Amino acid sequence: MINTVIFDIGKVLVDFDYEPYVRELFEDETVAERVLKAVWGTGFWSELDYGRDKEEVISEILSADPGYEREIRMTVENIGRCMGLRGYAIPWIKELKSRGYRVLYLSNYSKHVMNARPDVLAFLPLTDGGVFSCDVGAIKPDPAIFGIICEKYGLDPGKCVFIDDNPDNIESARVFGMRTVHFTEYEKAKAELEKELKK
């Protein structure tokens, strides 16, 4: 019987649509493409999620395309502009809590992103806790992070449902022993979660 629902945050409870943000920031298509490739196409952005120093990571990003330092720095420093708390997030968590389910979060998240828009994490006090990757030095889909949250909260993976937008993370959680819901849109995910909760 399921007793715990674990949410990813970005693109599930919180908007993180960086591509349209970059294209709005830089009307020139070439500039936008170069910035997107340097920041998110190199793998360096994920280093922030491990908890690494922001300036160190920015230096590595810049090494991928040093000719666009101004634009890359502008993109990273203003990242909060592509974030927002989704309207259904708090009601969804409250509803699950009212039915007696434990609600946790498990997210690849950096201190920089946290500081950029702390308001989008307004739902955190409503949860029973969770794990941010930057605090533990592990990121999804590494199975280690699922072990960390289970150990921290004494969870039985078979009694948990994990909700995430990334198929790789979903597969890792499934192999770890959790039930899963691949998030693509709210109504569909909510319906799929209800099916899992009834099993």
Image (cartoon, helix red, strand yellow):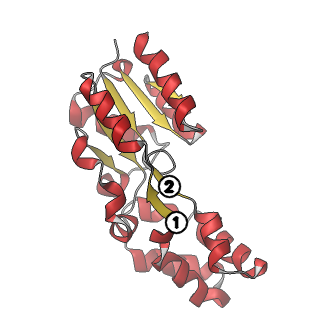
Q: Which percent across, then down, holds residue 60?
A: 53, 77
**Which residue is the site of mark 2?**
15
Q: Which percent across, then down, holds residue 91?
A: 35, 38
For marks 2 and 1, give the CA distance.
7 Å
Query: What label sits on residue 138 in the rendered view?
Result: none
Of the numbered discs 2 and 1, the one sitting upstream in the chain is 2
Identity of the residue drawn at 45% across and 20% down: 194
126 left or right of 26 in image: left
Residue 20's image quarter? bottom right
The reply to whether the C-beta atoms of the residues labelled 2 and 1 are less than 8 Å apart is yes
Identity of the residue drawn at 50% across and 81% down: 59
Q: Which percent across, then down, holds residue 161?
A: 41, 26
Identity of the residue drawn at 43% across and 31% down: 162
Q: Is residue 38 visible?
A: no
Compared to 60, does 135 lie above or below?
above
Q: Is residue 49 visible?
A: yes
Looking at the rendered structure, the kind of residue marked 1 is: Cys
Instruction: Please identify the quadrant where the N terminus is shown.
Output: top left
Q: Which percent across, then down, holds residue 143?
A: 44, 37
Compared to 162, does 12 lie above or below?
below
Nearer to me, 171 or 31:
31
Residue 100's image quarter? top left
Identity of the residue drawn at 38% across and 71% down: 116
**Which residue is the site of mark 1?**
82
Instruction: Please identify the quadrant where the C terminus is shown.
Output: top left
106 left or right of 34 in image: left
Q: Residues within 10 Å of mark 1 (few under 14, many from 20)?
A: some
SS category of the residue bearing label 2: strand
